[in-house]
Amino acid sequence: MSESPVRHFADYRWEETDLLAYKEEGAAPFKAITRQTLFRHPEMKGELRYFEMAPEGYSTLERHQHVHAVLILRGSGQCMVGGQVFDIAQNDLVTIEPMTWHQFRANAGEALGFLCMVNVERDKPQLPTEDERTALAADPKVAKFFA
Ligand code: MN
C-alpha cells in the first residue's frame, strides 16, 4: 500500500498499482483481459479489483460459492448471468449470486472495464463441463453470446 491515501487515476490505470494478467495462462479460457487490485486491507474481508477487456475480450465462464458485485466503469458489452444475457454499459451494477454461471464479454466494439468486489478468502471457480456449456447454449441468446 502506498504512503499517500490517494492514488491518482489516468486512462484506467491507478498509480502505484500493478497491471496484472487476469489469471495464470492456461488456468482457464479467457481473452484480452487485465487485472488491477485496487484495495486490499487486513481489516477488511473483501477486496476491490478492476478488470479490463480489450474489444472482443472475455472473462472465464465460471461459477463459485463466493459472490461478486460488479460495477461497469468503462465501455459496454454483455454479460451472461445464470443462463440469461444482458446488455451492460457504464455505471450498471451486476450482482452474481452463489453458484451462478457468469461471463463478461466486450462484444460491443469497445473496451469493457469493471470494478469487482469479492471476498479475499474464496472458493476456487468451477468451469463448466462440455455438457453444462451445451445446456447453457441451448438458449439461442446464450449461443450467440458464446459465439
Ligand atoms: Mn467469478
Image: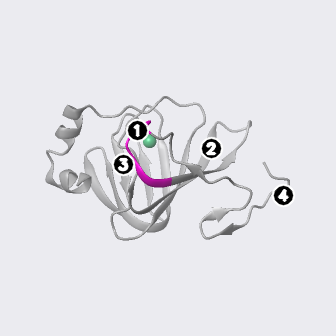
Q: Please state the horizontal and vertical placement of residue 87, each as a whole percent of the image.
A: 32, 63
Does 14 sit left or right of 81 as displayed? right
Q: Amino acid at mark 1?
A: Ala
Can you name the residue that lies furthest to the right here?
Answer: 3
The magenta stretch spans which residues? 26-33
User: Along the line of sight, which residue is nearer the eye, 138 or 18?
Assistant: 18
> Which quadrant of the render holds ligand 1?
top left
Looking at the image, tell me whether mark 4 or mark 3 is earlier in sequence order.
4
**Where does label 2 land, which residue?**
47
Which kind of residue does numbered mark 2 sit on?
Answer: Glu
Marks 2 and 4 in Cβ contact (< 8 Å):
no
Residue 70 spot, x, y in % from top left: 48, 53
Which is more N-terminal, label 3 or label 1? 1
For the question of whether residue 90 can be seen, the reply is no
Mark 1 and mark 3 in contact? Answer it, CB < 8 Å: no
Q: Secondary structure at mark 3?
A: strand
Q: Residue at x 78, y 61 (%)?
A: 6
* Dot 4 alpha-carbon crowd within 10 angstroms: few under 14, some 14 to 19, many 20 or more: few
SS at circle 4: loop
Q: CA distance from mark 2 to mark 1?
A: 22 Å
User: Helix, strand, or loop for circle 1?
Assistant: loop
Nearer the camera: disc 4 or disc 1:
1
Q: Which residue is mark 3?
A: 103
Residue located 61% across and 48% down the image: 48
Which residue is drawn at the image coordinates 81% and 52% (left, top)? Answer: 2
Residue at x-position 38% and y-position 62%: 106
Q: Tell me: residue 62, above or below residue 80.
A: above
Q: Specify the farthest residue to the top.
A: 123
Q: Give the label on residue 2, or none.
A: none
